[in-house]
Amino acid sequence: MSLSKKIDFALIISVQNANPNGDPLNGNRPRADFSGFGEMTDVCLKRKIRDRLQDAGESIFVQSDEKKTDGMTSLANRAKDKDVGLGADAFNAKKANKDDTAKKACEKWLDVRSFGQVFAFGKSDDASGVSIAVRGPVTIQSAFSVDPVSITSTQITKSVSGEGDGSKRGSDTMGMKHRVDKGIYVAYGAMSPQLAERTGFSDADAEKIKIVLTKLFEGDASSARPEGSMQVLKLIWWEHNCKSGQYSSAKVHGSLKVHSDGSYELNNLEGLQPEIIDGF
């Protein structure tokens, strides 16, 4: 049974001496808009959701390179592999039923039935350019800081061993490391029962995402994001009483006001009581 109620949610995220989402086109500096407000893109947040779901044992289609569990070298190979995916025939233009293929993909992978996916294959593939689009019921916005963030950049030196037996030291290389000194970020999202009917996204699937949202940064540590430097402070979870929702997502999200110290205020919406969940 698909999702029975519309759901809205919000994440309050704390960043301390970390690079929450580097911009590769800007020397990997933390993303910020022209007004200085920090940003974590929706793609970055969905990557972390996928990783946490995969850590929990869920079947994930868009796997990161360091978390690949099936040895597939590309998404196309994963989709067409008969043991892991749907089989090559599912993407053969002469044989495939697009609706049937999309249904099988949603049944197989949780992230496909949650966020959707476009299965696009070039002319060199058996599918001869066929494209299969799945529109997911779960959407999440980019997270933005409550106040403009202060970004500190530090010059670093990288030393590596030379060639040969490694006894000779190689030349040092210079680089830069960036961090947000301190910031509170807020992200909003929603789950649509109407779109869930198409992918088979269920109440149980929503509960799985709800659980991983509270521990988004556990197991995500790196030199740019040291352990403990990023934390979900609160998950605000609104469950409406019907599929269409009692209020628009804009009104629900607008009822939350977050302050620079991580505290927040909620304007009461009659008949819609949010669940407040502490981060992991």
Image (cartoon, rainbow, N blue to C red):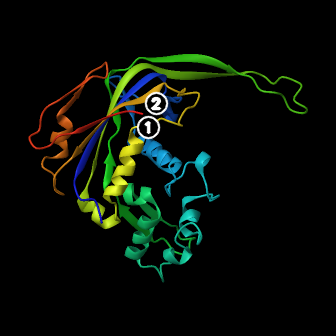
**In front: 270, or 153?**
270
Where on the picture, by quarter, is residue 172? top right
**In front: 64, or 235?**
235
| Mark number, residue 20 | 2
Where on the picture, by quarter, is residue 102? bottom left
Task: Inspect the image, locate mark 1, and give the three-letter code of the amino acid beneath it.
Answer: Lys
Residue 193, image x and y in percent? 25, 59
| Secondary structure beneath label 1 | loop
Residue 31, image x and y in percent? 43, 30
* Mark 2, other Cα within 10 Å: few <14 / some 14–19 / many ≥20: many
- Labels in figure, total: 2
Q: Give whichever of discs 2 and 1 has the lower sequence position.
A: 2
- Judged from this view, the residue extending furthest toward the left is 270
Cα distance between the residues tagged 2 and 1: 15 Å
**In front: 209, or 41?**
209
* Mark 1, other Cα within 10 Å: few <14 / some 14–19 / many ≥20: many
> Image point 52% across, 71% down: which residue?
86
| Mark number, residue 215 | 1
| Secondary structure beneath label 2 | loop
Pick the quarter of the image with the C terminus.
top left
Residue 185, image x and y in percent? 35, 28
Task: Inspect the image, locate mark 2, and give the three-letter code of the amino acid beneath it.
Answer: Pro
Q: Depth-wise, is mark 2 or mark 1 nearer the camera?
A: 1
> Image point 32% across, 60% down: which residue?
202
**In front: 134, or 234?**
234
> Image point 58% across, 72% down: which residue?
82
- Identify whether 64 is placed above or below 1: above
